[in-house]
Image: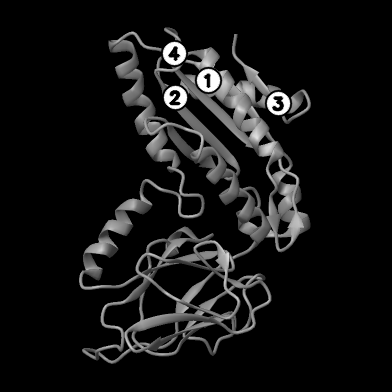
Amino acid sequence: MSGDGDEKTRVTAIVQKPPGAAGPGGGDCLVVIYTKEPTLLGKRFVLDMSPLRIGRGPENHIVLEGDSVSRRHVHFEQRSSTWYAVDDGSTNGTYVNDDQIARECALANGDRVKIGPTIFKYLSGTDVESQYHEEIYRMTIIDGLTQAHVKRYLLESLEKEIIRARRHQRDMCLVMFDIDHFKRINDTQGHLAGDHVLKELARLVQARIRRDEVFARYGGEEFALLLPETTIEGAAQLAHDIRARVEENRFVFQNERIPVTISMGVAKLLDTHKSGLDLIRDSDERLYEAKRTGRNRVVVAQ
């Protein structure tokens, strides 16, 4: 996301359990699946005390630095065998699976807990270790915020699909698009609002595409759609439909509507393309043409 570096996040474990001590939740843990600090991605915090507190203040068990994190933001407490996320009156709220909790929420295995710009995933059950390793693998192919594929997965898929398209003489297209004036959203309404827009946009796109199509977050507010066995006419129609859906959608964060539009570039695989990067370049050039000529539009390679 443009401007992601504006809000630094540092996660620090303050309290350590004694070696060999058993925590109240067994192997239950919180795993960082999205953060503005790449070195924190995948870090695991065992729920070995109740309550376990998270916030910006140094007295918390886990300290998150960032303007959108309150001094005492949230705590996790165990009741019987169930862990609860309990908001401590934070300014920007605590979210579980994208819904802001009024006060507290019982956690189920796999729930996502968002605190400021950081997203944790709650893991519990009899095989937490296996779940943890599966989650680490998933983070190599799925973006933790939007649930779209990551850029690396797109690039690998693109090369495979080019080989398949040429072998079977099939059409293939790529759509590149990004959010118009996204920096303005971050600057005027905050990074949490920007994160909400990214997630909602991804949800709209994922509801529209087929299973064999690859939707990826290319970087920041830029996304890509890899469309196997799709003509340029079909790709253009899909792009126009997605653009219209985004413009018509009500993006609302903390009771405030955020106008959102996207610019899109569409290109097809050509015999002259030596690699997937050539196709990306062609699609990207059309995307920037769409932005130069007024934004909120689709430009298709001829």
Label located before the other in sequence (3 or 1):
1
Label located before the other in sequence (2 or 4):
2
Q: Amino acid at mark 3?
A: Arg
- The residue under label 3 is 297
Whole-angstrom CA distance, mark 2 to mark 4, is 16 Å
Question: Label 4 neighbourhood size at 10 Å, few (<14), some (14-19), many (20+)?
Answer: some
Q: Amino acid at mark 4?
A: His
Label located before the other in sequence (2 or 3):
2
**Residue 74 at x, y percent in the picture:** 54, 81
- The residue under label 2 is 227
Disc 2 element: strand
- The residue under label 4 is 273
**Residue 193 at x, y percent in the picture:** 67, 57
What label does residue 235 carry, if any?
1
273 horizontally vs 202: left or right: left
Label located before the other in sequence (3 or 4):
4
Q: Amino acid at mark 1?
A: Ala
Do tag 1 and tag 2 residues touch (Cβ < 8 Å)?
Answer: yes
Whole-angstrom CA distance, mark 2 to mark 3, is 19 Å
In percent of the image, x 28 and y 92: which residue is there? Answer: 18
